[in-house]
Amino acid sequence: MCGIAGYVLRNGVANLATVRAMCDQIKHRGPDDEGFHVQDGCAIGMRRLSIIDLNSGHQPIANEDQSIWVVFNGEIYNYQELRRNLIGQGHRFRTESDTEVLLHLYEQEGEQGIARLRGMFAYAIWDSTRRELLIARDRFGKKPLYYAVRPEGLYFGSELKCLRAAGVPFDHIDREALQLYLRLTYIPDPWTAYHGIGKLEPASWIRYRCDGAIQQGIYWSLPTPAEGEPPGLSQEEARTRLRDIFDESVRIRMIADVPLGAFLSGGIDSASIVASMARQSSQPVKTFSIGFEERGFNELPLARLIASKYQTDHHELIVRPSAVELVSKLVGHFDEPFGDSSAIPTYLVSEFAAQHVKVVLTGDGGDEIFAGYPSTLKVHRLRKVDALPLTARRAISWIASKLPYAAYGKNFLRLISRPSALDRYFELISMPYFMRQRLLQPAWRSAEAGGDSNRIFDRYLPDEPADIVNQTLYFEMAANLSGDMLVKVDRMSMANSLEARCPFLDHHLAELAARMPYEWKIDGTVRPGKRIFVEAIADRLPPELLAAPKAGFGVPLASWFRGPLRSFLWDHLTSARFCNRDICEPEFLNQLMVEHDCGRRDNYHVLWRLLMLEVWFEQQEQGIGVAQPTCR
């Protein structure tokens, strides 16, 4: 695990100072080691967090004749099998690391070999004979990779700050990307906050030649969830296969030459991972849990049930963070606006765990592949609205628009009046429509497509026809997972030099889950989804945990905005500087803040989103001057 960076020029000679400056920006991702290779117009480098092959895994690594070099961020879990096969084909290895496998696999199969990898990765290979650079990213986008194609060449890095250090212009903020942020709380791939800089999309690769030719390809596609019972797979057989593949996914992620543990909350996903680890380990599993003093944000009692059942080496902490200091720190690590407030506990539990281990397993991905989010259940339940005639829906929409903003049920009427089930889903996961209309200036609402669809989101939906629930599941994996959840986990863990591994996102497990119809996943009783997975592992978990309602990994932001963060919030969102950005209507924003302050309504979600945006703006201005928003 590490951070990587580099560039290749069409003309001219690369230099060590530039690539070193790029890697210096991500020292937190790899404090154990550094390495560089500079040759002609190419310079690649890395910062290493040593996990496997501690003694001989120094990067960059070259092939036998030193014509091909690689820098790599991630872990390849099937590298030993690949290594044996490559040795059988005549390749010679100098190290025991998974990194060297990438080199010989490239020699043997080119970019076609990427599909053989099982793991999380972002890597770059410089082929000096062909004078071309190949960059690639894992199937779900667990490991980040930013890039910019400039007239002089291509630049890449694990974080945006790498590209800035190389002199890539950050002059123009992409307004369309920020519009998406205001709707979703994150900027989905391939957008970034900056015009001309992109994220390499999950499951894809780019080949860049020194003559400027560029080619991009996709080596894997998300499977569209099944539309009905799969032939030859009963529910009983599915539960057995789920257990087996899940346990294997956990087992291969326990391979490390350094101390390893797991995040443990009060939820099904992390609990099932700890249970599987304990069943496959000869030593007590190290587990890490945090809680808050505020009632309703402390899952430590549920976490203790699992820790006790499996006799883990359990560590827990009631955190009392310096909220103001933490906000600025988080924004600096994300490099662009990021409004998912669960980044706070993720950072804090990573900071806590990093005092004891260098690798943790996490439960991220379970909700996406097994329909665990409440929005999926709501979409399923609202199918009956489709029976309403279009004229009735138009009447409901008109009534909703005429009600006062504070009227109870106004947003629900808007929701059921939508012309399609897919529109209802996007209403559920976005900032509420009537809030957007009153809060945002017209220029900041233009990302909303007209008519009856949200065409801007079409790229995150399956190409083939699919049931509405399956469309939402696909969107969760294609957009929310890589743009929100995995960004959060990567940045917050690596900010603390901690590697996080996600067993639920093993592509073998995800492909099996996709074969199962949503009727096998949606429960709708205590928990909204994951029925078949829960049935598969229920005997491993305490009944009290199984009976507990689903709870997010949250923080008491609502009370913080009335307490320790109140002055910070008001100072930023009522400042002349923020008002002059012409993003929000000042009077309505003040109304939202007053409503929240007096406890009449919890508006902390949107207030946090705006606060993170403004702190990000301020950091950009302090670092690179005022960037002007431009549309694509």
Image (spheres, rainbow, N blue to C red):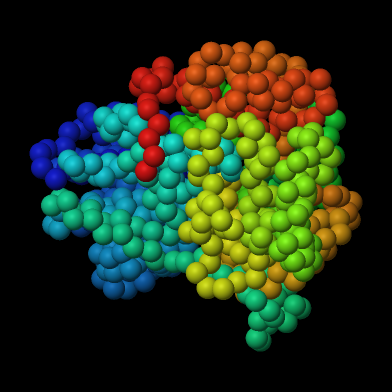
Tally the marks: 0
Q: If the image is split into quadrants, where does the C terminus sit?
A: top left
Q: State the image coordinates of residue 336 (x, y, percent, origin top left).
A: 47, 33
* Residue at the outermost bottom position: 232
**In which quadrant of the rendered view does residue 240 lie?**
bottom right
Q: Quadrant of the N terminus?
A: top left
Q: Is residue 204 left or right of residue 541?
A: left
Residue found 75% across the figure and 17% down from its top: 563
Instruction: State the image coordinates of residue 392 (x, y, percent, origin top left).
Output: 77, 60
Q: Nearer the viewer, residue 36 or 26?
A: 26
* Residue 70 visible in the snapshot: yes
Name the residue nearer the viewer: 517 or 574. 574
The structure residue drawn at horizontal position 34% and vertical position 57%, both measured from the top left corner, is 205
- Can you say whether 155 is above or below 607 in the image? below
Q: Locate residue 117 relative to residue 597 in the image: left or right.
A: left
| Residue 488 in sight | no
On the rendered structure, is 481 left or right of 417?
left
Q: Position of residue 155 (x, y in %)?
A: 27, 41
Seen from this angle, which residue lies furthest left? 12
Residue occupying image coordinates x 25% and y 64%: 107
Drawn side of residue 107 relative to residue 13, left or right: right
Residue 305 lies, with reference to residue 596, above or below; the image says below
**Quadrant of residue 147 within the rendered picture:** top left
Q: Nearer the viewer, residue 378 or 499?
A: 378
The foreground one among 164 and 607 is 607
Query: Which quarter of the picture shows residue 569?
Result: top right
Q: Looking at the image, which residue is at 67% across and 36% down?
A: 435
Question: Please, is residue 321 above or below residue 395 in the view?
Answer: above
